[in-house]
Image (tube, rainbow, N blue to C red):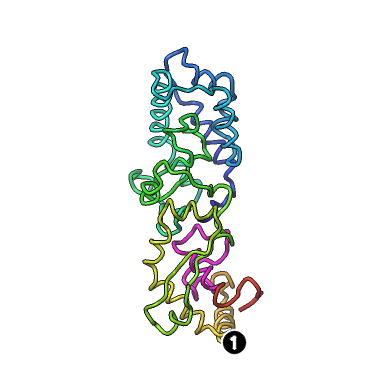
Amino acid sequence: MIKINDFNTQHISCEYADSVIKMERHFKMGNRYLSYILNERNFRDDIVLCTPSKLIKVIESFNLRFPDIDYDAEDWRYFRNYMIRQYERVRKGILHLVLNSLNLSVCPYCNRQYIFGTDNNRKVGAQFDHFYSKSKYPYLALSFYNLIPCCPTCNKAKGEECIEINPYIEGFENNGKLMVDSPLNCILRNADWEVKFKADDRCKTNIQAFALDELYKKHKDYAHEIVLKSVAYQKGYYNDLKISFRNIGITDETIERILWGNYLDNSQLSRRPLSKMTLDIINQFLNLDDCDDI
């Protein structure tokens, strides 16, 4: 739903890859799948550090190399289980460091829940979803850009389902907006209105996988507050408030966060829950996209 800020991601991914490569590995020799990813391919650069847009190319190459996989055969089951065990080692020993380095506060899939943890308690905070399932695509189990930090609710909801939007590449942006379907009813506090998505087909795969339509309907009270603020903050009054805050040395960015209760810059939507909905509803009511100043 929101893009993971790519500031410093390349450096973080390289540190992660170095840690993965240094892990001690014990495996049965002669497994053709392990031989392929560890010997025929550059495991670090082609697999672990594969860019998010090229993950599908790795899948296609693997399928071309092994067009006749018997998923019940011992060699495939050994390979799958080995890669999953390696991932469990990474999850327990490395991924909490990745999360802290990414400086990601909110689940990128739903933008509803905080996911930061603590250094002392690794059970608190984010889980990591495999964008491409580690059971179906075990050769991507350790790929950095296949590991999406997310809240437990989203991780459980998605399971092994395929979705279109990888947060390392993009968020919904203007292709999937949250809107109040009946603004007048909302303003008048009538019951007949909902928070709904206006989304393209690609965004809809994510919306369905995480049940975002149903979940965001539960945030009507929050949406109603944003609508009322949008109505109350008539242009002149809003500018007067901004001037008052400026007079005590507060930046415009901080002023907007104070007045709306959230971050409104696309690059900072990952810092607080419901920021995407806040921005979308403000744009719906005040046409912020077309105004330099409100």
Left or right of residue 82, residue 51 in this image = right
The residue nearer to you, when weighing 166 against 237, is 166
Picture quarter with the C terminus:
bottom right
Q: Residue 88 lies in what quarter of the image?
A: top left
Say what secondary structure mark 1 lies in.
helix
Instruction: Inspect the magenta stretch and tell me whether residue 180 lies in it.
Output: no
Residue at (57, 72) in percent of width and height: 283
- The answer to whether 22 is drawn above or below residue 9 in the figure is above
Give the image location of residue 219, x and y in percent: 39, 68
Left or right of residue 253, residue 88 in this image = left
Residue extending farthest front = 68
- The answer to whether 100 is drawn above or below residue 57 in the figure is below
- The answer to whether 274 is drawn above or below residue 236 in the figure is above
The residue nearer to you, when weighing 273 against 69, is 69
Dominant secondary-structure state across the stretch colored magenta: helix
The residue nearer to you, when weighing 285 against 113, is 285
Residue at (54, 83) in percent of width and height: 241
Give the image location of residue 131, x and y in percent: 48, 42
Give the image location of residue 99, x and y in percent: 46, 45
Amino acid type, callout 1: Gly
Q: Residue 85 lies in what quarter of the image?
A: top left
- The answer to whether 280 is drawn above or below residue 232 in the figure is above
Left or right of residue 30, residue 287 in this image = right
Q: Name the residue under label 1.
A: 236
Q: What stretch is highlighted in magenta?
A: 255-282
Give the image location of residue 91, x and y in percent: 40, 36
Instruction: Inspect the magenta stretch and tell me whether residue 276 lies in it.
Output: yes
Q: How crowded is mark 1: few (under 14 residues within 10 Å), some or many (20 or more)?
A: few
The residue nearer to you, when weighing 93 against 292, is 292
